[in-house]
Amino acid sequence: MLLFEAIVIDDSDVVFNPFWRQGMFVWPFCARLGLLLGANGAIDSSSFRLDAGILSHLILAGLMLFAGTWHWAFWDLDVFILNKTLAIDLLRVFGIHLVLASSVCFFFGYGHLTGSIGPGFWTTDSFGLIGQVRGIKPSFALTALSVYSFGSLAAHHLAIGCLGCIAGLWHVASRPGPSLANLFSVSNIESALASALPPVLGAASIVSATTWYGASSCANELFGPNRFAWDSSVFFQELLSRLDYQSSPEQLLLYDSIGSNPAKGGLFRSGPIFKSDGIVQNWLGHLDFFDPNGNILVVRRMPAFFETFPVILVDQVGEVRADIAFRRADALFSIESRGIFANLEGGILGRQVLQTASLVKSLARKAQLGQVFTFTPVAGFSLDRVFRTSVRGWFTLAHSLFTFGFLVGHIWHGGRAFFRDIWLGVLSLTSKTVEYGLNEKLC
């Protein structure tokens, strides 16, 4: 998938045509780990680190395939045998694999976060404007869960790596009593499978929630803004606090558009975000509306839940001053009768005052969707003006489905392990140790 995205991606304009508007799924995660940094520190799709990342994962996949095949053929090694009998010591196998996996987990997190192994980790500010890959100095802050902390960036790989190594070594060195062994069916490999599913379930749930709701590790530059930034008008309020609209960061302008809202686009609308309108070309300017009395009016923005929404202009206390009615008979607050005019500031149009009712209504409709842009058609795409979701929506959907599958699998295999005597129809299995697997087949 990464190779495919490396072929089709266009990194010529990282401001108005970023990765997340192009429908890139794996690309933002590689950028977060610094795999796309060129020689000058800028994002570069031809970076050597990207090739090294692809090659290392292919090698790792090959080693795992080889290890799985080897263990399938040589399962009866002494290290896996319990009391010199042909029965696999599942607790020892579990402990060994937990130590190995936790060690990789710890050094992966430490290397990428501190920059000691690799370039570092992508960090940014609250509005996603100054993001870049940096090495982070750890501050080992003790919390309720003893999570290593890098400021606001929680280092889950370090915490889980340490915890997993301790738990793995404990499982290798210690044995449970007969009561615990029978309670958790430790002699059944299906019980081991059921026990291995909850950690994956928990990890998938965490990454789904942090990606959708937003976290310090999910930067806006890489994943786009989250849904609640639009609902709370975070970027709009920030733009209003800047007196000079002309010098406002272009990224901030793009974030303050409903097309950047991941909740606005349906998951079953295929294609990248720019298939809706195209690639942003220019920002027209900041819009303010006024009535003849000098009251500043703001267009009520379209909520994420709606596909259509009435155009309503409200004053600073939220009172409706004008609207665009659905029917002429209801036009009591029409823009024409109320004498509403628009003021443009910044952008390519500069400072202008527009009083023509048709232009004011056109701008009011556009203002429902956030900042007003002009777009350039994309070669090879037929634009349909239909909203689409960003990588946040796709990632959250996929990992939520994974979570549900792991949950069902955990309950299913755990139930089969606990109630093996019921579904086998045998209330008591022989106490004689036999070759592993024969007791399951009732031979």
Image: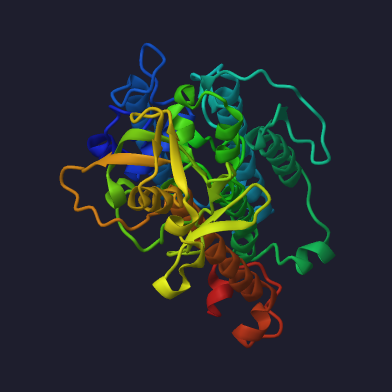
In the rendered structure, the answer to whether residue 212 lies left or right of residue 382 reads right
Residue 33 or residue 68, whichever sits in front = 33
Residue 32 percent across, percent down from the top left: 48, 31
Is 103 in front, or is 108? 108
* Picture layout, residue 135 above or below residue 367: above
Residue 313 screen position, x and y as percent: 53, 54
Residue 72, given in percent of the width and then of the height, sits at 44, 53
Question: Is residue 224 among what the camera can see?
Answer: yes
Quarter residue 254 falls in:
top left
Q: Is residue 331 above or below residue 157?
A: below
Name the residue located 21 percent from the left edge and 43 percent from the top edge.
Answer: 377
- Residue at 60% from the left image edge and 49% from the top image edge: 213
Q: Residue at x 70, y 62 (%)?
A: 186
| The N terminus sits in image quarter | top left
Between 319 and 209, the one nearer to me in the picture: 319
Q: Is residue 427 left or right of residue 201?
A: right
Answer whether residue 211 is visible to the viewer in this image. Answer: no
- Determine whether 417 is above or below 159 in the image: below
Position of residue 311 measured from the top left corner of the image (x, y, whole percent) = 47, 59
Would you identify the image quadrant in which residue 18 lies? top left
